[in-house]
Image: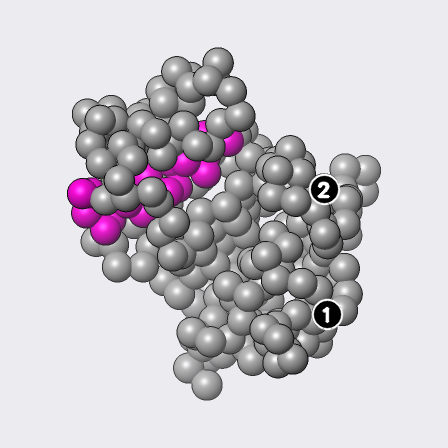
Amino acid sequence: MLDETAPHAGTPPPLQLRDVTSGYGAAPVLHGVSLSVAPGEIVALLGKNGMGKTTLLKTALGILPLKGGTVLVGGTASAGLSPARLVALGVGYAPQEQPLFPDLTVRDNLRLALRSDRDLAAGLDHAASSFPFLRDRLRQRAGTLSGGEQKMLILARALMMRPRLLLVDEISEGLQPSVVARIAAILRAERAERGTAMLVVEQNLDFALGVADRWAVLKRGEIDDAGPSGPAMRGRILEHLSI
């Protein structure tokens, strides 16, 4: 186990995992993982398929139960909390599996992110400022969007919640480079404007290093290595990903 929990003073970290063990049924996938995301920080979680990255996100969200250790969201233990309580704590989630309602319009899918229609107009403006194509597609059924457009809709919906902590799972997968670059710019802008902390699960190394302050490589359910982002880290990370 490599403990990559960074020291914090004053404000609790938006996300802190301490010696977390989790998995499916009786089969453990995570083995004593420690990881933190500081206020306003973007951390990239890297690794091959099947190494436990999505399991880590689902454990942090309480979708999968803890088998050991502690998950703290803003200093509050997340085990057993309802999704509504996590949203109230400022957690947003852009999952990999595209959980849209395909027969609902784009507008109605975005509306689901808000607890009150009083915030809808401002939320739609924010979504359209990040993804301008949405402004002309509000009445279109979400299921008729392209795969890339659906991913952008998922991210826009998560950002409409104005989260303090955003968990993002493989958002760049299958997207053309221009769209990936656009999403990277949006994540950086969101952090700069709102101070949003993010844990970004990725396999696209260029995208991850382009948005993140720090990175960690997850291998066979453990943090194998971690460090600050930057071009000099590329070779070091590739060594871990190629084994």
Question: Where residue 174 sits in the image (x, y, percent)?
Answer: 26, 59
Which three-letter amino acid code belongs to the residue tagged 1?
Lys
Q: Main secondary structure of the magenta part?
A: helix
Q: Residue at x 51, y 20 (%)?
A: 116
Q: Give x and y (percent) for residue 82.
A: 66, 44
Q: Residue furthest right?
A: 10
Q: CA distance from mark 1 to mark 2?
A: 21 Å
Task: Residue at 43% x, 61% y: name it.
Answer: 202
Q: Work out whether residue 41 or residue 166 is closer to the camera in this orientation and state it.
A: 166
Q: Is residue 201 left or right of residue 104?
A: right
Rendered position, 14 above or below 20: above
Is residue 40 something one can see in this rendering? no
Few, some or many residues within 10 Å of mark 1 (<14, 14–19, 20+): some
Among all residues in the image, which is located at the extreme front?
103
Residue 95 in picture, x, y percent from top left: 44, 52
**Disc 1 target residue:** 67
Left or right, 59 with respect to 176, comes to right
Query: Which residue lies under the disc numbered 2?
Result: 74
Where, by quadrant of the figure, is residue 59 drawn?
A: bottom right
Graded by Cα atoms within 10 Å as few (under 14), some (14 to 19) or many (20 or more), the crowding at tag 2 reads many
Q: Which residues are magenta?
A: 144-161
Say if mark 1 contacts mark 2, CB within 8 Å.
no
Q: What count of labels does the image hold?
A: 2
Q: Type of residue at label 2?
A: Gly
- Confirm whether residue 35 shows in the render: yes
User: Where residue 182 appears, x then y in whole percent?
Assistant: 30, 41
Disc 2, SS: loop
